[in-house]
Image: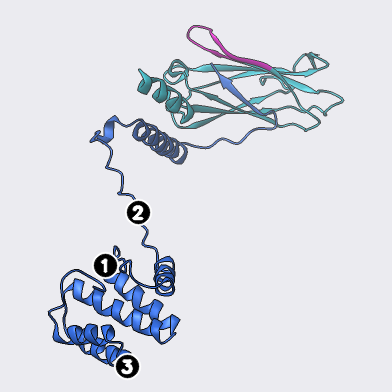
Amino acid sequence: MTRLRLLVPLLALCGCGGPVASLWLRVEAPLQVPDAADGVWVKVSRVSDGAVVFEDARTLAGKPFPATLALTTENALNLEPEKVRVEVEARRAGALAQPWARGSAEASLREGRVVEAVVKLCDCPGEG
Amino acid sequence: MIAGELPPPDPDLLAARQAYEQARYREVLPAVERALSHPLPDAERVQAHALAAMTYAAFDDANAAVRSYREALKVDPRFEPPMSVSPKVRALFEEARRTMPVVVQLPPAPPPAPGVPVWQRPWVWVVGGVVLGGAAAGVVYATGQRVPAGTLGRGVMQ
């Protein structure tokens, strides 16, 4: 039992608890920071069951678009063949910055890989 | 008797002893030197050095007397001059004994720990766990792709 108590934290420390996959999110938007937008809201959910695996609003902290966010997961349920849907909103003072400033993308996460997802927020017909 | 109960069988030592008892001190030291020049039993070697010490004392050569007593003590650390020696000679002997190099007896090494198998010692598991954990972390780090933080930082998907 003592050895088990020792082994579990060690495994947790070394990151041996499960598969690791990464999502590199890139958000492009023709919005000036901070006048037109000062933050980005991101939600990631599994396509099959709709489970939300990540949701957060991040501030742009004066950095212009494109904005990037690194997401990781050790949950095997999030990996392929499952897909995750990434929904993004560019916000200003907590509200949608522009009616068109929202978009989404889908990605298949693979163990040990970094998958890039690009969401383009644009007032352009057929995009966003 | 000077330095023992039995008469010395070595002729040179016997001559030295007779010369000393007859106060022919100048003959003592050469006879002692002759006696010491060949192998002697420890008891006789001690008597030879003691005779030399007393003779040196008679010549008021305190340093040589102390050296001779030290030689006697080297052969037999329990050596004691007879009670009949003069206080001066006794003092020289005490000085020799006091200034003898001290032999330090180190305590015996502790016995080794009882034979506990290595795998039953806790520190082996601790060290092994740390090494294995570090190795696994190294493998994961080396084989996995490292993701830098974005401008929005990092996040963890559940």
Q: Are marks 1 and 2 on the same chain?
A: yes
> Label 2, on which residue?
B106
Image-based side of A106 in relation to B63, left or right? right
Image quadrant occupied by the N terminus of chain B: bottom left
Q: Position of residue A10 (x, y in %)?
A: 44, 28
Tell me, yes or no, if residue A18 can be seen here.
no
* In the foreground, B54 or A33: B54
Residue at x 19% of width, y 68% of height: B5
Rendered shade, chain B = blue
Q: Is the residue marked by circle 2 packed among few (<14), some (14-19), or many (20+) residues within 10 Å?
A: few
> Could you say which chain is coloured cyan in the image?
A
B133 displayed left or right of A52: left
In this rendered view, identify the residue nearer to me: A4 or B100.
Answer: B100
Q: Which residue is mark 1?
A: B76
Mark carried by residue A82: none
Task: Tell me the tag on residue B26.
Answer: 3
Whether A100 is drawn above or below A22: the answer is above
Residue at screen point 26% across, 83% down: B21
